[in-house]
Image (cartoon, helix red, strand yellow):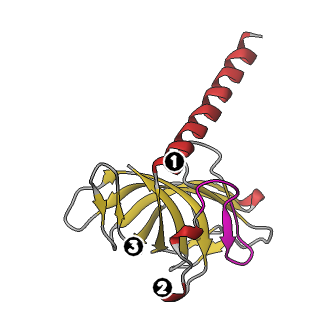
Amino acid sequence: MFKKIVFLAVALASVMLTTATTAKAQNEGHAVYATLKNEIDLRSAKPGDYVSAQLVDSVSFKDGSRLSKGVFLTGRIVTVDPAANSFSLVLDRVQSDGQKPSAISVVVRRIDASVAADDLPDAEQIKPTGDPVSKVRGVLLANATNASSSALFSSKSKSLHLDYGTFLGCIVSR
């Protein structure tokens, strides 16, 4: 009985932390696109693999800090589940030229296929609430299921793949 209560308490705490982290990023964050700078393929991806995306536009925060166009959001693959045709990733660092990486909160809310930057939808299309949006054929985007992930990607087919240059519509906050 005690083990069940402890398990339920831990599960509830995890859900509350996930909700609080996602709500913070979505409520205080800014919508911006970032371009994926490496391919991610379910067949070869492993937890811990490096992931990088480059900001398409600049972002200014209430505290006066700024992320310039071209800085990198970096992170890693968190989970890989071939049976469910899914993986999750976290982007939790920002890297500017010549600077040390610093922490950042990123929630991926939209993905778009590689297109010319001029053809990219406006950042207003990145909605902080509601269901995440995928404009990449065969790829589903879901809210992260735990506080250590920025996004959960899945596919109904057996080959889940994100190309170099895929656009990630992100809500970023410090």
Residue located at (72% from left, 10% from top) = 2
Q: Which residues are magenta?
A: 127-141
Name the residue located 29 percent from the left edge and 55 percent from the top edge. 101
> Which residue is at 23% across, 56% downward?
100
Q: Earlier in the sequence, mark 2 or mark 1?
A: 1
Residue at image mark 2: 117
Give the amino acid at mark 3. Answer: Asp
Residue lying farthest to the left in this orientation: 98
- Disc 3, SS: loop
Question: Camera-side residue: 3 or 32?
Answer: 32
In the picture, measured across the screen, residue 67 lies left or right of residue 97, that is right
Magenta stretch contains residue 25? no
Q: CA distance from mark 2 to mark 1?
A: 26 Å
Q: Residue at x 61, y 66 (%)?
A: 110
Quadrant of residue 168 within the rendered picture: bottom right
| Amino acid marked by disc 1 | Asn
Question: In the rendered view, does 3 fall on the left or right side of 18?
Answer: right
> What residue did someone put label 1 on?
27
- Magenta segment, principal secondary structure? loop
